């Protein structure tokens, strides 16, 4: 479970049982996938059963941060469980629909990262501030400097947990369909439909002062 | 855990500890969220620890299907665990970035569905065929009729599991930022940046016969 200089050491649970060439353990690949979005699916065990919730995350170096209300279940769990809460945090980008001649070879082009580990409550005030800024900037880079920071009451209502990048793998599929040779003459269209996330025109809040210009960091999205 | 005529009965684990007005239990809302995409994050417990994997799903009536290699861990688990594998299947759409005057009130507009339950291996051949067609059509409606169906060897290599929609909730956030009144005069831009999934121009497979036209169901994406 120790991280090497250039990557994450594979473990029994980060080595897939199939499609092993799709697995990657280098930091650059993992960071790139994590840095291009902000939504993860966080899994934990509650009363013996799995729970998977969508939530925001931020990466700061080799640590991921997740935040939420102090009343939320996973965060309460991490705060009160000794020594921490076992979690699995997964991030997935869908890049394309892969249509093959055969139903069997249909697939998805994707990039995903799965992080296994233990989440701990962050109590150090400086680290909490870093994490809260990073959570805003992960969604919109540059935004934390252009909003009112949390005051004491808001900070007290916000739980922050950390998950270190130790047991980590990425999985990537790219390219066209892998049809069997005997299917290539079939008359069905085959190929890839690219999928992307796009941003629409920002909509100002009701009653917003029209003199407030759209910031450059939003136009850049 | 029983489903009512019009919706899913709330349970202790489908009632959120906060933001309760965002929770929905009616079938129409849940089906609509499930039917507008095809990627879920499937959680299960392995050796006491949570695992969350991205995978495709399909809805057929009140049942979700997931498939994969017979060698994959969750599917092997569902096939060999008696009575089935406890899972949590979560689907999330991101609809907008909500930028408030205060960092604290930043949010995401989203629609999500969380399904708790037990996954069972599907062994009935007719149900397996229905599920495999639905898994293709969930990604591209109409596609299963325009590809070669699985043959006996391919079918034998594919595990299919089912998860009935019994303990289910949707959660939806819409609208602009909910800033505190005393923050409204701050000079920061506030509002919503819409987020959408878009499809690019389909790319034919290498060597594809150029006489094969792009099917209407792809142009419709």
Image: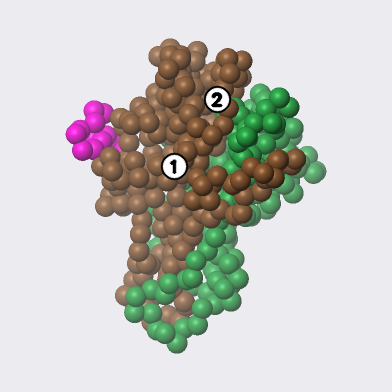
Chain colours: A green, B brown
Q: Which mark is residue B91?
A: 1
Q: Main secondary structure of the magenta part?
A: loop
> Callout 1: 10 Å neighbours few (<14), some, many (20+)?
many
* Horizontal arrangement in the rendering, residue A148 relative to residue B53 (left or right): left
Label 2: how many Cα within 10 Å (few below 14, some 14–19, many 20+): some
x and y percentages locating residue B52 in the rendered image: 53, 34
Label 1 chain ID: B
Does A131 appear above or below B86? Answer: below
Q: Residue at x 23, y 35 (%)?
A: B9
Q: Please identify the quadrant where the C terminus of chain A is shown.
A: bottom right
Q: The magenta stretch spans which residues?
A: B1-16
User: Depth check: A210 or A64 in front?
Assistant: A210
Q: Are marks 2 and 1 on the same chain?
A: yes
The residue beneath circle 2 is B149
| Residue drawn at the location 60% of the way across and 71% of the way down | A220
Q: Residue furthest front?
A: B211
Q: Nearer the viewer, mark 2 or mark 1?
A: 2
The total number of labels drawn is 2
Q: Is residue B5 magenta?
A: yes
């Amino acid at each position: 479970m120790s991280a090497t200089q250039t990557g994450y050491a594979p473990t029994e649970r980060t080595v897939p049982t199939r499609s092993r060439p799709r697995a990657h353990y280098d930091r650059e690949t993992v960071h790139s996938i994590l840095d291009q979005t902000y939504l993860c699916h966080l899994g934990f065990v509650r009363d013996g059963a799995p729970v998977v919730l969508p939530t925001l995350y931020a990466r700061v170096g080799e640590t991921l941060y997740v935040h939420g209300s102090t009343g939320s279940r996973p965060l309460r769990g991490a705060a009160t469980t000794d020594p921490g809460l076992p979690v699995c945090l997964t991030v997935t980008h869908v890049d394309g629909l892969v249509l093959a001649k055969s139903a069997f070879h249909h697939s998805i082009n994707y990039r995903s990262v799965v992080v296994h580990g233990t989440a701990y409550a962050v109590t150090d005030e400086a680290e909490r501030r870093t994490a809260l800024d990073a959570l805003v900037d992960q969604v919109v880079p540059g935004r934390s400097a252009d909003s009112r920071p949390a005051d004491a009451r808001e900070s007290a209502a916000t739980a922050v947990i950390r998950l270190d990048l130790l047991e980590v793998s990425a999985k990537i599929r790219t390219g066209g369909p892998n049809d069997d040779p005997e299917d290539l003459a079939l008359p069905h269209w085959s190929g890839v439909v690219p999928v992307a996330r796009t941003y629409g025109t920002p909509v100002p809040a009701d009653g917003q002062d029209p003199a407030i210009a759209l910031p450059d960091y939003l136009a850049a999205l």
